[in-house]
Amino acid sequence: RVKHGGRGKACFFNAEMDEATRARRQIESELRHAITRNQIHVSYQPVLDAQSGEISGYEALMRWNRPGHGLSEPDIFIPIAEESGSIVQLGEWVLQQACKEAARWPLPLRIAVNVSPVQFMLPNLCERIEAILKETGLAPGRLEIEITEAALIRDRDRVMATLQRLRSLGVHIVMDDFGTGFSSLSNLRTFPFDKIKVDRSFTGMLDHDAAARSIVRAIIGLGHSLGMPVVTEGVETETQRQIVVEEGCAQVQGFLLGRPDVEPSTKLAARETLLSSIA
Ligand code: C2E
Ligand code: MG
Ligand code: MG
Ligand code: MG
């Protein structure tokens, strides 16, 4: 009897697993055609200068309009694309699209693009980025590549070579989601980053958690002493914004200041008109 119950449970578990695996396979196969079926686009979220409040750039965020499912969450489909390898094609498409779009903006703002650890390990990543910059005409100094600590754990010599090559092109490198990895401090010492982004989980705790504020203060202090400006992402309330500005954060990003948007250029054009009327 006990044995039978145990087996029944195992069967139930397997049936669930099969369902999850099927769903995953389905996403994998749909993702392979997502670009050619025009289901992928890029949304742009503003990054603001903390002092002046002016837009200093945008982060490109991948969006997948999955038929029958609406907009699919990157936190769900990107890990699947990383595992199946589709992220290489998808990531390159976003890079190309974002650079092309940014090259047309009426103001020479920065464009930040997320690069997956899988893409980061590709031997031809630097060549591809160089080619995209040439094709689109975007000045390399306007491009920021965002990587997380997961990109740093493999072959550290190769990671270093890639980072240095990108920097020698003039491209900026941002450490994204800082504070969630396991060896954050030594990574900052070892690798040449231009900027640090505090993970938004800390930002979310700022209004009611004194410890979160201490952590953010420590990260900003660390950034300053290493010559790396610090950005706070996920700013949702005025209190959070005030706290991070008081703590000396250089840039802010979050729903309070602007949501990801498919058409930032119209706002930029309006700002250019404003600027030229002042000048
Ligand atoms: P990330 O690079 O840390 O991007 C910031 C995420 O935080 C975005 O989620 C953005 O919409 C969200 N966000 C911004 N402000 C706020 C806020 O005030 N509150 C909250 N709750 N969220 C905020 P999104 O677009 O869903 O992307 C999630 C993650 O997926 C990204 O995190 C990044 O790791 C990955 N991702 C997105 N686009 C790409 C891409 O083109 N390539 C790669 N490799 N990864 C991407
Ligand atoms: Mg990012
Ligand atoms: Mg982040
Ligand atoms: Mg993230």
Image: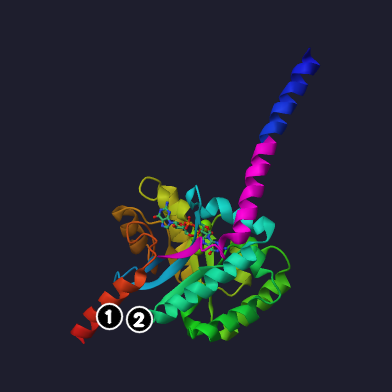
Q: Residue furthest left?
A: 277
Q: Residue furthest front?
A: 37
> What is the crowding at mark 1: few (fewer than 14 residues within 10 Å), some, or many (at least 20)?
some
The residue at 69%/37% (across/down) is 17
Point out which mark residue 63 bears. Answer: none
- Residue 119 location in percent, x, y? 64, 68
- Residue 223 location in percent, x, y? 49, 68
In the image, the segment drawn in magenta is 17-44
Q: Amino acid at mark 2?
A: Leu
Q: Nearer the viewer, residue 255 or 157?
A: 255
Q: Reply yes or no: does residue 200 show up in magenta.
A: no
- Residue 101 location in percent, x, y? 44, 76
Mark 2 falls on what kind of element? loop
Mark 1 falls on what kind of element? helix
Q: Nearer the viewer, residue 97 or 58?
A: 97
| Residue 227 in view (yes/no) | no
Q: Which residue is mark 1?
A: 272
Q: CA distance from mark 2 to mark 1?
A: 7 Å
Q: Nearer the viewer, residue 144 or 24?
A: 24
The residue at 32%/57% (across/down) is 256
Q: Looking at mark 1, is its residue's CB closer than 8 Å to ligand 1?
A: no
Marks 2/1 in contact by CB < 8 Å: the verdict is yes
Q: Which residue is mark 2?
A: 107
